[in-house]
Image: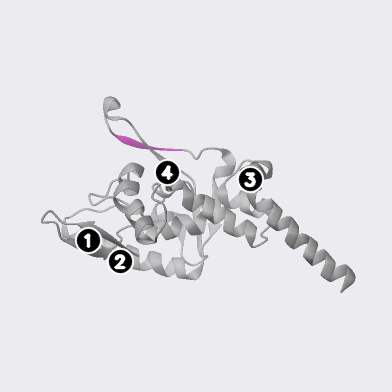
Amino acid sequence: RVITRTEPDGRTVTVENKHRTLFAFMLCTGARPSECFAVKWSDIDFDRSTVTIQRSVEWLSKKQGGSWYFKDTKTKSSRRCVPLPSPMLQQLREHRAAQSEALLKIGIRTDLVFASSDGTPLQRRNVSRRYFKPALRAAGLSDDLSLYALRHSCATLLLQANVHPKIVAERLGHSSVTLTMDVYSHVLPTMQTEATAQLERMLYG
């Protein structure tokens, strides 16, 4: 929730992490960073507790003009509806209220859920360097991890909880279960051990 930063005068201060809701969202949904940065408020259904992932944002290099544009998701299967846990929905409500208040003060409106201070899409490099890596250090973790670590953590946690790989693949927007199994093969030995234990209980009591 918090990070530490060094002020120009050399003082070290602790502040609330500006993008903590974004990081929680990435961990809950398993969405790619570019997909999260393109989510609009209209994509979130608070009544049904879901978010529809249906686009991603692409930033051009400075040589290409440095602008951005929305594009379709990586594959057809990447377009998906993901259920959200109740605490995440509450966090999003609080985030929306804070975002609206902050942007109203400077006369800016945005339909993006996670936006920069001027209402434009976030850039992964800036978010990672300024907010994610300090959060990792504050948590005692290696700051070599990228934002994709949240996506991978989501999948690993679900598989370790014995959620069916097909469900995990759908949540991640993978084109096939085979891809999910290949990427997260390191989790399978634990799953097999648990499966054997369950069979033992059912067959032998």
Q: Could you give the CA–CA distance between mark 3 and mark 2, rounded to whole angstroms?
A: 36 Å
| Marks 3 and 2, the one that precedes in the sequence | 2
Secondary structure under the numbered disc 3 in the rendered image: helix
Q: Residue at x 83, y 64 (%)?
A: 199
Q: Could you give the CA–CA distance between mark 4 and mark 3, rounded to whole angstroms?
A: 19 Å
| Marks 4 and 2, the one that precedes in the sequence | 4
User: Relative to the observer, which residue lies in front, 60 or 140?
Assistant: 140
- Camera-near label (3 vs 1) is 3
Q: In which quadrant of the rendered view does residue 22 lie?
A: bottom left
| Marks 3 and 1, the one that precedes in the sequence | 1
Q: Is residue 115 left or right of residue 6?
A: right
| Marks 4 and 3, the one that precedes in the sequence | 4
Q: Taking 68 as reference, is 134 above or below it? A: below
Q: Amino acid at mark 4?
A: Ser
Residue tagged by mark 1?
102
Residue tagged by mark 4?
34
Can residue 174 be seen here? The reply is yes
Q: Taking 5 as reference, is 66 above or below it? A: above
Q: Could you give the CA–CA distance between mark 4 and mark 2, rounded to whole angstroms?
A: 23 Å
Q: Quadrant of the N terminus?
A: bottom left
- Camera-near label (4 vs 3) is 3
Q: Residue at x 63, y 59 (%)?
A: 160
Name the magenta segment's main secondary structure: strand
Bounds of the magenta span?
A: 67-71
Q: Could you give the CA–CA distance between mark 1 and mark 4, rounded to whole angstroms?
A: 23 Å
Q: Taking 174 as reference, is 165 above or below it? A: below
Residue tagged by mark 3?
180
The answer to the question of whether label 4 and label 2 lie on touching residues, with beta carbons closer than 8 A, is: no
Q: Amino acid at mark 1?
A: Ala
Secondary structure under the numbered disc 4 in the rendered image: helix
